């Protein structure tokens, strides 16, 4: 589904179903140098089980036009503007991965009346990026993509890649990041996103301000955002639960069933509680 935000096309995948703003809405926010497709194994279930789905492409990331936004706070405001533009009037769920988890956290803190629950996947605070990787993301982007892709997966042959002939999760992630760069070569999207994560300094304040329930999903083998860092952030929140799955940073692909089960149980519990 394509919307118009401030004169720019903004894209959100709806899970293969027509978008119905009257249903409980689940918003999915990708991480650095990614797009909506990283949520493919979760969004279709939500869209077919009583939820409306908005899996966004952030500005400058593939199908959403415009310059990439420079701060987590600006990204959060953009996400909530897209939700409003889609006609959603009831509070929505916001699920985010990595950089997207910081965006989801800020959505809850900055727009409390519009968010009913958040899911923070592969999160950490602070989400610092080394000077060497920041430099590589600007001046040697191909090397940076290869490094991050290697660190994001706990194995070169993860399920569901191995049982599915022709599917290779590691290679697919590599090509996705390369495509984001190719579609917006002048914007330095990777460097922009990493810089936003590195500069974000309001995590503890946002966690304390967020009144809605929060679900943390961590990967026990995550080399990018350690589970310990997520536990510390969860301790700052009023209502938080933590689920750990045996995988790396790219947990939606490595452990799609466990991630979906956790998200679905969380969303259903919040909806049932009213």
Image: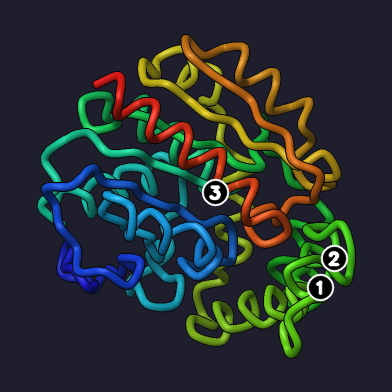
Q: Is residue 274 toward the left or the right of residue 248 in the image?
A: left
Counting from the top left corner in percent of width and height, residue 150 is at: 85, 65
CA neighbours of label 3 inside 10 A, class few (<14), some (14 to 19), many (20+): some
- Which residue is the site of mark 3? 260
Residue shown at 11% from the left, 40% from the top? 89
Residue shown at 62% from the left, 12% from the top? 235
Label 3 vs label 1: CA separation? 27 Å
- As drawn, 40 above or below 122: below
Q: Which mark is residue 225?
A: none
The quarter of the displayed image where residue 63 is located: bottom left
Counting from the top left corner in percent of width and height, residue 219 is at: 76, 42
Label 1 vs label 2: CA separation? 6 Å
- Which residue is the site of mark 1? 146
Q: Which mark is residue 150?
A: 2
- As drawn, 179 above or below 55: below
The quarter of the displayed image where residue 139 is located: bottom right
Kindly check if marks 1 and 2 are in contact, taking CB atoms under 8 A apart as contact.
yes
The structure's colour scheme is rainbow
Kindly check if marks 3 and 1 are in contact, taking CB atoms under 8 A apart as contact.
no
Label 3 vs label 2: CA separation? 24 Å
Viewport quadrant of the C terminus? top left
Viewport quadrant of the N terminus? bottom left
């Amino acid at each position: 589904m394509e919307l118009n935000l401030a004169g720019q096309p903004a894209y959100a995948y709806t899970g293969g179903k027509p978008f119905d703003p009257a249903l409980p809405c689940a918003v999915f926010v990708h991480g650095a140098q990614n797009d909506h497709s990283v949520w493919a194994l979760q969004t279709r279930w939500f869209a077919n089980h009583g939820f409306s789905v908005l899996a966004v492409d952030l500005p400058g990331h593939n199908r959403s036009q415009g310059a990439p936004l420079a701060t987590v706070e600006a990204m959060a405001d953009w996400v909530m503007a897209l939700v409003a533009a889609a006609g959603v009037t009831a509070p929505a769920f916001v699920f985010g991965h990595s950089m997207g988890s910081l965006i989801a956290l800020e959505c809850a803190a900055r727009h409390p009346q519009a968010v009913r629950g958040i899911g923070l996947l592969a999160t950490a605070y602070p989400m610092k990026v080394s000077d060497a990787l920041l430099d590589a993301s600007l001046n040697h982007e191909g090397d940076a993509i290869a490094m991050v892709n290697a660190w994001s997966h706990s194995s070169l042959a993860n399920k569901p890649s191995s049982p599915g002939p022709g599917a290779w999760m590691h290679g697919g992630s590599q090509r996705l990041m390369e495509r984001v760069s190719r579609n917006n070569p002048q914007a330095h999207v990777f460097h922009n996103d990493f810089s936003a994560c590195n500069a974000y300094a309001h995590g503890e304040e946002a966690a304390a301000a967020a009144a809605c329930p929060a679900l943390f999903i961590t990967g026990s083998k995550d080399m990018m955002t350690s589970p310990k860092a997520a536990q510390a952030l969860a301790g700052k929140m009023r209502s938080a639960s933590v689920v750990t799955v045996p995988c790396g940073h790219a947990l939606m692909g490595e452990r799609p069933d466990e991630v979906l089960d956790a998200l679905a149980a969380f969303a259903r519990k919040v909806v049932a509680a009213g």
